Amino acid sequence: MDFVPPAFEAKLCAPADLPARIGRLARPLVFTNGCFDILHRGHVTYLAQARALGAALVVAANSDASVKRLGKGDDRPINRLEDRMALLASLECVSLVTWFDEDTPLQRILDIRPDILAKGGDWPVEKIVGYREVLDWGGQVHSIPFIHERSTTALVEKIRRL
């Protein structure tokens, strides 16, 4: 029997392939980013809310090196980029998943030119990377309030205490 990859694998996209793939997505296009190290209820709720702002959602995940530079701990990320991206792609609300190796997702934002930029409620709108650029081309920027207060850092700390 031949191995047939799950359909969600088609949502994975290398940064170099973004120009060809973005044009096939429905508009308005929503963009968000993050580490998504251990996917939890807070993440999936936030991603569903972000997707509801538009017709398609592109998620850019921090590369492993980018996560390490954030100073979240020497053992972070817990999950490798490929695994984090696969979990994100498996979500119905996510249309496309890519990554960035830089400290911020600004280059992906410029590559994608989303109509809507979204981050979680812990980010004031004016502090969201790409805020000015998205507004300059007529887009919107949203800081989505948390419904479920969860964090990967808190989960990791809880596991360590067990």
Image (cartoon, grey):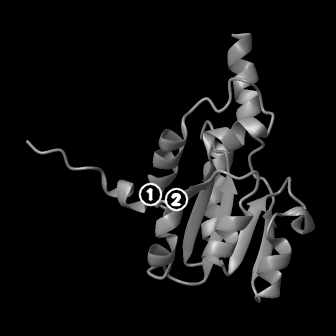
Q: Measured from the top left, where is residue 79 in percent x and y?
A: 56, 33
- Residue at 12%, 45% (x, y): give it: 2
The quadrant holding residue 160 is: top right
Amino acid found under the numbered disc labelled 2: Val
The amino acid type, in three-letter code, at marker 1 is Leu
Q: On residue 97, which mark appears?
A: 2
Whether residue 154 is visible, yes or no, is yes
User: Based on the displayed image, in which of its 4 quarters is residue 3 positioned?
Assistant: top left
The residue furthest top is 162
Q: Is residue 151 visible?
A: no
Whether residue 123 sits left or right of residue 32 in the image: it is right
Would you say the residues marked 1 and 2 are in contact, meaning their CB atoms lie under 8 Å apart? yes
- x then y, percent, for residue 18: 51, 70
**Cα distance in 3D space between marks 1 and 2:** 5 Å
Q: Check disc 1 and report the residue beneath it.
A: 12
Residue drawn at the location 56% of the way across and 84% of the way down? 27
